[in-house]
Image (cartoon, coloured by chain):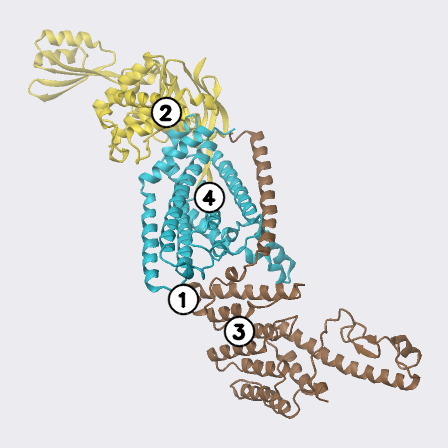
Amino acid sequence: MDAIRTEDLTKHYRVGFWRPRPYIALDRLSLTVRTGEVFGFLGPNGAGKTTTLKLLMQLMYPSSGRAEILGRPVGDVEVRRRIGYLPENPYFYDYLTAEELLEYFAGLFGYPAAERRRRAASLLDTVGIGAERRLQLRKFSKGMIQRVGIAQALINDPDVVFFDEPMSGLDPLGRREIRQLILQLRDRGCTVFFSSHVLADAEALCSRVAIVAAGRLVASGQLSELLAFQVRGWELVMSGVTPDALSQARADREIVNAVPIDGQRFAMELPASAAPERVLATLTASGAQLVSLTPIRETLEDFFMRQVTGAQRSSNG
Amino acid sequence: MADMRIIAHVAINVFKESVRDKVLYNLVAFAVILMGAAYLIGQLTAGQDVKIIKDLGLAAIGTFGLLIAVFIGIGLVWKEVERRSIYSLLSKPLGRREFILGKYAGLALTLLVNVVVMTAALYLVLGYMDAQFTEEQKSVWAAPALDAGMLRAVALIVVELLLVTAIALFFSTFSSPFLSAALTFGLWVIGHFNADLRNFENIVESPVAAGLARALYYLLPNFAAFDIKSQVVYALPIAPGYLAVTVAYGLAYIALLLTGSVLVFTRRDFK
Amino acid sequence: MTRSDPRGAWMSGALVVALMAAIVSLQHTQGRLEAATPDTAENLLYVRSPAAMSRMALSYDAVLADLYWIRAVQHYGGTRLSTDPNKQYDLLYPLLDLTTSLDPRFNVAYYFGSTFLAEAPPDGPGRPDLAIVLLEKGLRVQPDKWEFAQWIGFVHYWWRHDYAQAAEWFQRAGDLPGAPFWLAQLAATTLAEGGNRQSSRLLWQEVARTGVNEAFRNEAVRRLQQLDAMDQIDQLFQIVGAFQQRYGAVPRSWDDLGRAGYLRSLPVDPTGVPYRLEAGSVALGEGSRLSPLPREPQRLIQ
C-alpha cells in the first residue's frame, strides 16, 4: 500500500474581487509516495506546494482529481488519527504554554490525561525545548515555534508526517537537528513527506523527490537520477600550489580556470570530464595541500528558473 | 453523530482562553457598579431603591453579557483562520462541525459562568439592602427584594445571550470581525423592535408592505421577547407557557444558526 | 461531512427547513402569549417623561420619534378595532406627547394625533381637551403655523361645541401670515350662527379643498356626506309625518311610502346604503360608513 497517492489533483479558484479571473494553483498533480520513504516535494515559492499539502489535509477541497492517504480518501477522519502535519509558518494559541498546547492536541486524539502529559513532555524534549515547556507561546521565537510545530505533528506517533517547509526559521544547528529527527522517523518506519525550496535539504534526506513549478509536476524520481542535477564540474581549493604544477595541469586540460585567492592558494575549476582524484593526486605530489573539493551542480534555483521560463514560454506559445 | 467529548475538549480550551485574556475581569466592573449604585441610591432614598438596583443589575447582566458575546463571538472562528492556528488543529481527528460546536459551547460556558456570578452578586447586594428596611417600609415595594421570580428574567437573558453568540459565530464563519460585529449589533437592535412589525398591517394599506412586515416579523430574531425585566421587577403576571415558548423559540433559532455556521464552515477553503 | 457529500447536504437542508418552520410557529405562539401579557404600557413607553427621553435618545431622537409615532398609530388602530367593551386609549396621549417632544416639528403627529384624541368613544378616547393641549404645544414650537390654530378652532367647534372659542381661534388663525382669506369669514359665520349645518358645511368644504393630505380630505368628504345625510333624514322624517297624518298610522316600510306615492325609489344615503325605517323614525342603515352621525346641538336646544 502506498502512503500517499494523488490522481490528477487540481485546484483552481478565482482571484480578484471586482473582476475575478481563474487562477490555477495546482494542475493535474499525480504522484505516489511509498510507505517508509522520505519524500521531498520541491519547488520555488508559489509553485503549489502548500496548496498540495492543504488539499491533502482537507483544508481545501479539490476542484477535480483524487487524493488518498494510507489507502483511504483524505476526508476520512480515521486517516487523521495516523498522520501529522506541520503547516508553513505555523502559529498556535499564544495564551497557552508549549506543554498545554501539546496536551490540548493530544486530547483531540482521546488520550487519557496521564498519557497526554507523557507525550507532551517527551516530545518537547525531543525537539529541544523541554526547558521552556511552562512558558506561554507568546514569548517564543520563530525558531522555537517551529519546533513546537514539529512536536505537535508527532503527538500521535503518526505513520505519515507532512512537513511544510520544516527548516524555515531555524538556524544551521536547528536544521541539522531536524534533519536527524527526520532520519530517525524514517528509521522507525514513518513516511515523511516534506516540502522545501532548498535543494540541500532534499539531498541530505530524500530517497525520492518531486519538483513542481507553476502548479505543475515538472520532474520526479530519485534525485541522483534527475539529469539536471548531475555534476557539471568541481571546485578545488588548494594551498601551496606551485606555478609549475598549475601550468602543467592547465596544459593537461584538467583545469579550466584558476583564481588566486592569496599567495599560493588557488580556487580551481575542473570540468565534468576530469577525474578529480587524479588532479588531486598530481597536485598533492607537487607539495600542495587540499583545502576543499566541492562538486558543481545546477542549483534547484537555476533549475526552477529554467522550468518556470519554459512553462511560461509553453503557455504563451 | 457529533463527538460530545471532542466538543467539550474544544469548549474548555475556549473557556481557558477567555480566562487568560482576562474576560472575567468584567465581573469586577459589574460588582463596582452595583455596589456604587447601592451606596449612592442609599444616600438619596425614595423607597424605590430596591427596584432601581434590580433594574440596574438586570440591565448590567444583559449588557456585559452582550459585549462579551459579540466581541468574543466574532473572533471565535475568524481569529483561528486569520492566524492559521486552525491548520494544525483541523489536521487532527477533529471534524469542522465539532470545531464549530466546541467553539460555541466554550463561549456559552464563559457567558454562563459570568451570568451566574453576576446574579449571585446582585442577590447579595439585594440581601444587604433588604436588611436595611423595616417591614413597614418594605410594604410599598412591588416585589420582595430577594424575589426568586427575578431568575426568570435572568434565564431569558441567558437564552438571549446564547442567541447573540450564535449570530456572531454565524457571521464570523464567513465575514470580517468588523462586519460581523456591525451585523450582530444591527440584528440585536432591530430584533428589539420586532414587536412593532407585528401589527404593521393594521396601519399600512399596501398588501406588499404588510406582507413584508409580517415576513420580517417571523424571520428576524425577536429579541424583545426575551426582555421581561420590567415584568419581574414589578412582579406582574407572565402568561403561562410564555417562558417555555420563548426559550424554545430561542433554542430553535440557535439551532438554525449553528446549522448554518456548520454548513458554511464545512464548505470553506482555507487559502 | 465534506463538501462533496450529497446526503449530508440533503439532511442539512431538511434540518434548516424544519428549524425555520419551528421558529415561525414558536414566534406565532410567542406573539399570542405576549399579547395576553397584561403589562404593555411599560414596554411600549419605556420612559414616560418626554424630557428624559429626549436626553437619552442621543442623536437618534428623530428615529425614536418615528418609532413612537408608529406605536401611537398602532395603539389607536388596534384599540379602535378591539371588541372589548371596556377598551381604553390610555396610552395615546403619552405616546403622542413623546413623539412630538422627540421631534417637535412632526406635523403629521399633531394633525392626526389631535384628530384621534378628539374622536368620541368608541372610535376614540373622546378627549378634545388633550387634542387642544397637543396642538397648543405644536403652536408654541411653530407660532406661525396657522393650520394648528385653525385645527384648535375646529376641535372647539366640532367636538366641544364651543362656538365662541372656535370663532376666536379661527380669527387667530386668519391673522397669521399666509393664512387663507376665508378663515376670517369662517370666524364671522361661526360666531353668528355656530353649529348650524351651513357653517359646518362651509368648514368641511374648506378642509376638503385644502386639507393637508388625502386622508384629511377624505375625512372631510365623509363629514360633508354626513351633513347631506342629516338633511336627507330630515326630509324623510317630514315624508313619514305626512304619511302618518294622512293614514293615521306610521309606515311599516319604505314600500308603504312607495305604494302611497311619496317615494319613487328606495332611499339611500350618500354612500349608497339604504336608510332604516323603524317605528316612524329614520336612521342610517346597518353598516353605513357615515354612522354615527354627529350630535346636533341645535336639535337639543330646540
Which one of the lettered chains is coloured yellow? A
Q: Earlier in the sequence, mark 3 or mark 1?
A: 1
Marks 1 and 2 sit apart, C-alpha to C-alpha, by: 56 Å
For label 3, the crowd category at 10 Å Cα-Cα, with few meaning under 14, some 14 to 19 and many 20 or more, is: some
| Residue linked to disc 3 | C107
Name which residue lies at 58% across and 83% down: C153
Which one of the lettered chains is coloured cyan? B
Marks 1 and 4 sit apart, C-alpha to C-alpha, by: 31 Å
Instruction: Give the residue type at disc 4.
Output: Leu
| Residue linked to disc 2 | A106
Instruction: Give the residue type at disc 1.
Output: Arg
Relative side of A128 to A102, left or right: left
**The color chain C is rendered in:** brown
Marks 3 and 2 sit apart, C-alpha to C-alpha, by: 69 Å
Q: Is residue B145 above or below residue C100?
A: above
Residue C36 appears at what percent x and percent y?
60, 55
The nearer-to-camera label among 3 and 4 is 4
Q: Quarter-wise, where is residue A240 in the image?
A: top left
* Tag of residue C55: 1
Marks 2 and 4 sit apart, C-alpha to C-alpha, by: 29 Å
Relative side of B93 to C87, left or right: left
Q: Is residue B70 above or below residue C111?
A: above
Instruction: Give the residue type at disc 3.
Output: Asn
Same chain for mark 1 and mark 4? The answer is: no
Instruction: Give the residue type at disc 2.
Output: Ala
Marks 3 and 1 sit apart, C-alpha to C-alpha, by: 21 Å
Relative side of A296 to B132, left or right: left
Q: Is residue A203 visible?
A: no
Task: Tell me the quarter of the image containing the C terminus of chain B.
Answer: top left
